[in-house]
Image (cartoon, rainbow, N blue to C red):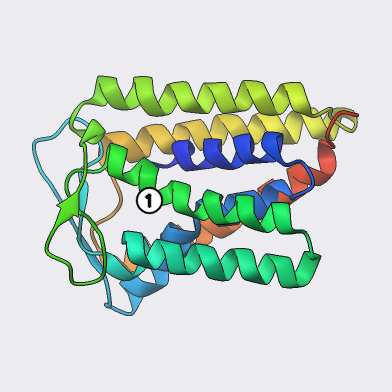
Amino acid sequence: MFVGHLAAGMIGKRIEPRVSLGTWVVAVMLSDLLLFPLLLAKVESVTSQPNVSANRIIGLEIGYSHSLLMNIIWASLFGFIYYLLRRYRRGAVLLFAGVLSHWVLDVVSHRPDMPLAPGAPFKLGFGVWNSLAATLIVEGGLWLLAIALYVSATRPKGRAGVYAFWSGIVLLTLIWHGNITRGMDPDPVKAGIGGLILFSLIVAWAYWINRLRPTRV
């Protein structure tokens, strides 16, 4: 998923507005933020699956970034670090759940390539990506729901809070459409560098939007 994970972050912001949208986005996208440098280091690998209508990417070795065991470890570390910095237990617990949401949503969307632990032979994946229509309905529906909830819970600070938000939403939707119709570049260097740049910009945008659209009182 792509906007499906971002949707989880926006819903998280609605549930716990004290946590910045940027921090929520880092949490829900953490597995992918870890995947890209691991691709560059050739620790993990992906391939392209032909003759499918939606996202063609399937993970070959993604246990350190995307397995259930490692997601629990990354979620625990993320929540613990947040607690040390903010001393806010509820936020730390919810961010722990936000990190874990990545594994759950990927199991729903991926083909069977989601391991339980690094090196574990058994892998899960319900394969929503096998159908372009199902991908548009499931992930697109979650995205629309999250946008509606976020807009209803925040108010823009002037025009910047309107234009910056909606321009970003449109751009992210277009990127998502390209992602599900073409998939990620199977070249690990291009995918790693491109992914790190794109996701860093998304995180920066989320922190910016958090300032431009405060929570309604």
- Horizontal relation, residue 12 to residue 174: left or right: right
- Horizontal relation, residue 165 to residue 67: left or right: right
How many numbered discs, if any? 1
Q: Residue at x 27, y 19 (%)?
A: 133
Residue 125 visible, this angle: yes
**Mark 1 crowd level (few <14, some 14–19, many ≥20, 10 Å Cα):** many
Q: Secondary structure at mark 1?
A: helix
Vertically, is 97 above or below 194?
Answer: above
Residue 203 visible, this angle: no
Residue underneath mark 1: 103
- Towards the viewer: 13 or 143: 13
The picture quadrant where one finds residue 182 is top left
Q: Position of residue 202 (x, y in %)?
A: 59, 50
Quarter occupied by the C terminus: top right
Q: Position of residue 157 (x, y in %)?
A: 89, 33
Quarter occupied by the N terminus: top left
Q: Position of residue 71 (x, y in %)?
A: 41, 62
Q: Residue at x 25, y 63 (%)?
A: 187
Q: Position of residue 130 (x, y in %)?
A: 18, 32
The picture quadrant where one finds residue 159 is top right
Name the kind of residue labelled 1 in the image: Trp
Q: Residue at x 84, y 29 (%)?
A: 156
Q: Residue at x 28, y 54 (%)?
A: 185
- Towards the viewer: 67 or 1: 67
Q: Residue furthest left?
A: 51
